Image (spheres, grey):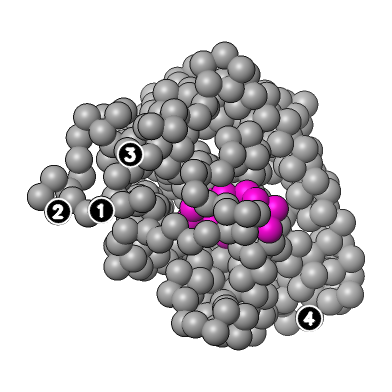
Amino acid sequence: MELLTTNNVWMMICTALVFFMHLGFAFLEIGLTRQKNTINILFKNIFIITMGLLLYCLVGFNLMYPGDFNGFLGFAGFGLDAPMADGALDLAYNGGYTYWTDFLFQGMFAATAATIVSGAVAERMKIGPFMIFTVIYVGLIYPIAGSWKWGGGFLDKLGFYDFAGSTLVHSVGGWAALVAVCLLGARIGKYKDGKPQAIPGHNIPLATAGVLILWLGWFGFNGGSVLSADPELTSLVLVTTCLAAAAGGVVAAIASTVMYKNLDLTMFLNGILGGLVGITAGADVMSPTNAIIIGAIAGLLIVFAVSFIDKLKLDDPVGAIAVHLVCGIWGTLAVGIFGFSALTNDAGEFLNASGSVVATSSEAANSLSFLPQLYGVLAYAGFCIISSFVIIFILKKTVGIRVSEKEELEGLDAHEHGMDAYPDFRLNER
């Protein structure tokens, strides 16, 4: 009972940290966009977490963890139904924490996918269609995709590995963000004569605070994904998470300085986030050295991905596609490239997070894990691209997804909310 209590308390602390990440996302998004759209962005972020939790309670949790199913789609019923033993709550549920804790922790993850999309479509998407998209994507698409691995589906049986969601959370949101940006188009003034123009965010200090909050929240995001308070594994996860974040930030700052001849704080910040996303798939099976390498490559990818996305004339105000999609893919494949480098037993055999032997040599571990990682990336890409395209395309052809030119130029706060985030400090904006 004492161990159960310890594990359960740790999981609830991690749940609170993941909840706190939504404040970080909100700060980052409003900081990197213009003040005239602040209320609109905050409204979307609050809607995502509130509606996301309700949907996850009603259908999402039982779609994601349906029990016995065919590996592609299953449903355990509407609402929450805690397992009972001898007329009381089964305290041995899931080997170390309660059913209610499990629901709340996983529910905090569910809303993140739509938050990623919110940043990518900021400043020009109608709020009504975005809310409809959120309901469908968080309520149905995310939990179905999650069931393929975390619910014991076909990818789990193939050996696909994603510890805390480089693909299951970040790429699921990243693919939808990419589709949405393509269908929505760029903001007015973003491209002139085919060349990208800077549209500065209105509060970079707030964006910086958002990134630091997100980094702190990742202690719960990755640390809680151990699913226990195991001291050795939890400590390792927090170390690899922090080292990857630090390496991602430093390398992104250096690379952007070399390329653009200026010390760009926003690149530094996104490099940190890229490192965090990159390590998330394998934070529990990487050595500290490999975590630094993974984070460093993620930071480098951020700089080149942001530039490449701009060349494609895809307008992503906060860099969500580069951070969550590109680094999510990299982090997932990195598990296969580096193998299970941190967890070994006395015989030198390579272990997974549960302590099971997966290979007897590094070569075997790498060959064992890379192909399933690639299969997983491709499976989620196909499912998320098709599903998000269908949802957003139908919305575009029926109710429309783009605000009018007047609304975009004057700001969504005034036209969609009738409010001003800073009524006493109005600035002249483009």
User: In terms of secondary structure, where does tag 4 sit?
Assistant: loop
Amino acid type at image mark 1: Asn
- 322 in the magenta segment: yes
| For marks 3 and 1 on the same chain, the one whose residue lies earlier in the sequence | 3
Mark 1 lies on residue? 428
Q: Are marks 2 and 4 in contact (CB under 8 Å)?
A: no
Residue in the image at 40% along x and 37% along y:
408
Secondary structure under the numbered disc 1 in the rendered image = loop
Q: Nearer the viewer, mark 1 or mark 4?
A: 1
Q: Which residue is mark 2?
A: 425
Q: CA distance from mark 2 to mark 3?
A: 15 Å
Q: Residue at x 57, y 20 (%)?
A: 395
Front in this rendered view, residue 72 or 381: 381
Element marked by disc 3 = loop
The location of residue 62, given as percent across then percent down, is: 55, 27
Task: Give residue 348's mark.
Answer: 4
Question: Is 70 placed left or right of 52 in the picture?
Answer: right
Residue 395, relative to residue 254: is it above or below? above
Mark 3 or 1, closer to the camera: 1
Q: Is residue 251 above or below residue 281?
A: below
- CA–CA distance in space, label 2 to label 1: 10 Å
Counting labels gives: 4
Q: Secondary structure at mark 2?
A: loop
Q: Find the distance from the CA under tag 1 to the CA under tag 4.
A: 64 Å
Cα gap from disc 2 to disc 4, whole angstroms: 63 Å
Label 3 vs label 1: CA separation? 12 Å
Report the amino acid beneath label 3: Gly
What stretch of residues is rendered in magenta? Answer: 311-323
Q: Is residue 218 visible?
A: yes
**Res. 89 visible in picture:** no
- The crowd level at tag 2 (other Cα within 10 Å; few <14, some 14-19, many 20+) is few
Q: Earlier in the sequence, mark 3 or mark 4?
A: 4
